[in-house]
Image: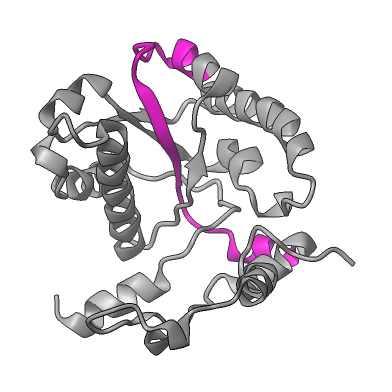
């Protein structure tokens, strides 16, 4: 792969929130996970475990547990643009890949560093590699974060995951229903903003931080409310 091919793949990948019912072959699932297992990790700890779920009832139970708990959390953040979330639609993807990490591997890392951060960094690299692999095969993915709480406990019990493990992310995997996304009005601002990127020269600092490029609080707030997909003004 040359540079242009790599850049094109990175640009094409985006999160999808609506999926077709078309099944994904087990071979394709293994292909994306094969890419995931080859990524670098801190200390070569390779902390990830992949749980592949295709059973419809189990997918619905996972989704229900997440959505029920998420509804309680939204009371704390009423400005969150909840329409961006893929969680309520996880069960529509033909495959869910739960990426878990084993906390016992913290022993791999120097004691003066935060092992939890290193595990999360490693798992994030793994998940992104899986997403790029999926894109290269014409498949769609998204990020679905759990991050503790009763929903993670419930899902661990559902799937027999050891209680001390962490479910870092759930990756829905399938074929994107682009037409359905276009027809879903609340997704319009998300689709419009998803490809927006800051200019490279705005974020490069040579030899030292260039204060001429430092954004004011007002500029950051404007960016959040005009470019992010989680803060969208409601009419």
- Considering every residue shown, the one lying at the far right of the view is 235
* Point 24% across, 75% down: residue: 6
Question: Residue 80: horizontal and vertical position, in percent?
Answer: 72, 51
* Point 73% across, 54% down: residue: 81
Which of the pair 231/129 is nearer the observer?
Answer: 231
Quarter of image, res 53: top left
The quarter of the picture where the C terminus appears is: bottom right
Quarter of image, res 101: top left
The reply to whether residue 96 is visible in this rendering is: no
Question: Residue 168: horizontal and vertical position, in percent?
Answer: 40, 34
**Applied colour scheme:** one colour
Residue 200 shown left or right of residue 112 in the figure: right
Question: Residue 202: horizontal and vertical position, in percent?
Answer: 43, 85
The quarter of the picture where the N terminus appears is: bottom left
* Point 70% across, 62% down: residue: 187
* Point 48% across, 48% down: residue: 143
Give above or below for 6 relative to 123: below
Residue range of the region highlighted in magenta in the rendering: 155-183
Query: Number of labelled discs?
Result: 0
Residue 109 shown left or right of residue 175 in the figure: left
């Amino acid at each position: 792969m040359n540079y242009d091919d790599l850049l094109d793949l990175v640009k094409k990948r985006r999160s999808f929130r609506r999926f077709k019912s078309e099944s994904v072959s087990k071979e394709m699932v293994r292909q994306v996970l094969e890419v995931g297992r080859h990524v670098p990790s801190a200390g070569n700890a390779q902390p990830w475990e992949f749980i592949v779920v295709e059973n419809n009832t189990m997918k619905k139970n996972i989704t229900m547990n997440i959505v029920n708990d998420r509804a309680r959390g939204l009371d704390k953040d009423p400005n969150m643009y909840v329409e961006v979330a893929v969680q309520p639609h996880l069960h529509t993807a033909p495959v869910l890949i739960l990426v878990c990490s084993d906390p016992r591997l913290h022993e791999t890392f120097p004691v003066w560093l935060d092992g939890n951060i290193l595990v999360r960094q490693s798992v994030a690299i793994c998940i992104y590699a899986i997403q790029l692999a999926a894109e290269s095969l014409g498949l769609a993915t998204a990020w679905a974060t759990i991050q503790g709480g009763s929903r993670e406990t419930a899902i661990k019990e559902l799937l027999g995951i050891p209680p001390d493990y962490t479910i870092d992310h759930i990756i829905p995997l399938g074929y994107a229903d682009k037409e359905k996304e276009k027809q879903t009005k609340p997704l319009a601002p998300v689709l419009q903003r998803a490809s927006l990127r800051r200019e490279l020269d705005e974020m490069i600092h040579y030899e030292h931080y260039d204060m001429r490029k430092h954004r004011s609080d007002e500029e950051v707030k404007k960016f959040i409310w005009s470019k992010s997909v989680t803060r969208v003004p409601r009419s």
